[in-house]
Amino acid sequence: MNMMSDPNASRKDWLGLLAKAPAADVAHYWAELAMAPDYTILRNPEIGGVMVRGRAGAVGAPFNLGEMTVARASVKLSDGTVGHGYVQGRSKDHALTAALVDALMQTDEADRIGANLLTPLRTAREERMATRAAKAAATKVDFFTMLRGED
Amino acid sequence: MYVAVKGGERAIDNAHAWLAQERRGDTSVPELSVAQIREQMTLAVNRVMAEGSLYDPDLASLAIKQARGDIIEAIFLIRAYRTTLPRFGGSEPIDTGDMQCDRRVSATFKDAPGGQILGPTFDYTHRLLDFKLAADGEAGDVTLAEPQTAAMPHIMSFLGRENLIQPEHAGQAVPDDLTRTPLELPASRALRLQSLTRGDEGFLLGMAYSTQRGYARNHAFVAELRIGAVAVEMDIPELGFAIEIGEITVTECETVNQFQGSKTQPPQFTRGYGLVFGMTERKAISMALVDRALRWEELGEDNLGAPAQDEEFVLYHCDNIQATGFLEHIKLPHYVDFQSELELIRKLRREVQSNMCKEAAE
């Protein structure tokens, strides 16, 4: 993803982070922010399925792999800013919080939310990924030659 | 004669109550939580997600608990739940080249760029029961190493550079969907792959094994097997662009198979493909072998009459929910059907017996 050329890059980034974060973590940092924004619901939080696709041979024609559960919601702040949340799993609260965060990230509250919600979510995610990658790296095979047959 | 009967309600209620008690088992043993199943029976959970065709570890764990560990019953529960979900849309095809690999091995290239990463595998264990687990299931420490930052390209791309492997063609952007339209034959490869990825692991394992033993002989090398997390992206109309809506763990298997060519076309290896939800290695390898066997026609091979080449046979019998539904219905009351069979056999016997009496009299 080229951050310079894509005007939606930062919004994509926080929406993706919110979608992949554990619902409990999102709820925790959101509660700590103790914000009570004035908003109306555009789309009630709802649970649904998304058909996940793969490609034949990893690079060929798309095919349907199976569905995953997704929750979504949309809100409008009193100043008219609209936010959308699409998150993995079946937590309606997670979807609603994601929609509120998406809306607030487009307002003056962006720095506060970025620092106190998105940054800790990102840090936790990066730590989880780094730990897994470190465990995987320890199982990498180092081949060495024991005997050559041609001598 | 047919008599309409009603009843059994009390018996059914009592049976279900007893079922719940049997599910719980000995109450002096602590109850199993859904979270325990999710965290400690991961591979069963993965199988239920793959064959239930719904990625949701919590739901799959609940289904396993409810089904008393009967995996096909759990898959049934997930399939039934799946039908209640409104469909928000279809994702962009996942990019398995961008996977964070927990495991990645190649049986064809020892020194593949990115290396051979064993991951948390059962391979090389001695398959001896570990009695320590019966006493104390605590795991020891795990060794960490400097994480790899280099890309881990698909092994197939190296063969592709030399044109040694048959290329994959772009197909229709929105593939046919088994869950929306009934399966019709001949099926597109997209439909075959969808059907195989949610198919029964045991059935596909048997089919794949048959190809190894010589039915539609098709020697396969595992060019690459990779397991890990990939992001799922979907286009969101109200946003006007695609975002990541989650992350799933998948297993991918790419096989390199015997080559074909002609006087005018230089020979190329052919390929089979397996992609399955979760850490489901046996299933992904089986899928790749069966996918390859089913491709005989498009690759210009002979129909050897092998079961694994017969798409009708494979696709119509690989779904364990369809199979179990039809199989198990025969234990339900068939009193009326059987009554007519009884009438018939009695009539036929009477006819034969009266003929025999006549012959004896003559």
Image: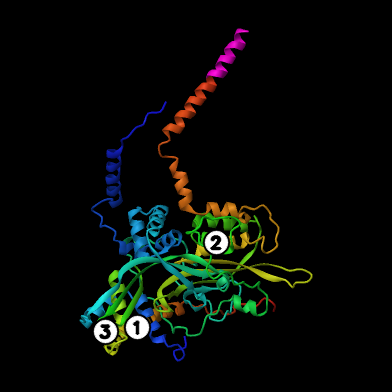
Q: Which residues are magenta?
A: B350-362
Q: Is residue B355 magenta?
A: yes
Q: Looking at this rendering, what residue extends furthest in the top direction?
A: B361
Dividing the image into 4 quarters, which one contains the N terminus of chain B?
Answer: top left
- Given the image, what chain letter belongs to the residue carrying mark 1? A
Local SS, label 1:
helix
Dividing the image into 4 quarters, which one contains the C terminus of chain B?
Answer: top right
Residue B30 visible within the image: yes
Which SS does the magenta portion mostly show? helix
Q: What residue is shown at x 43% (from left), y 82% (from top)?
A: B145
Q: x and y percent of residue A146 in the render? A: 59, 78
Q: Is residue B6 above or below residue B269?
A: above
Identify the residue under disc 2. B191
Looking at the picture, tell me which residue is in the foreground, B171 or B53: B171
Real-space Cα distance between discs 2 and 3? 48 Å
Real-space Cα distance between discs 2 and 1? 38 Å
Looking at the picture, tell me which residue is in the foreground, B30 or B281: B281
**Amino acid type, callout 3:** Asp
**What is the image's colouring?**
rainbow
Check chain identity for marks 3 and 1: say if they share one.
yes
Residue B153 located left or right of residue A92 = right
Local SS, label 2:
helix
Identify the residue under disc 1. A122
Real-space Cα distance between discs 3 and 1? 28 Å
**Amino acid type, callout 2:** Leu
**Amino acid type, callout 1:** Arg
Q: Earlier in the sequence, mark 3 or mark 1?
A: 3
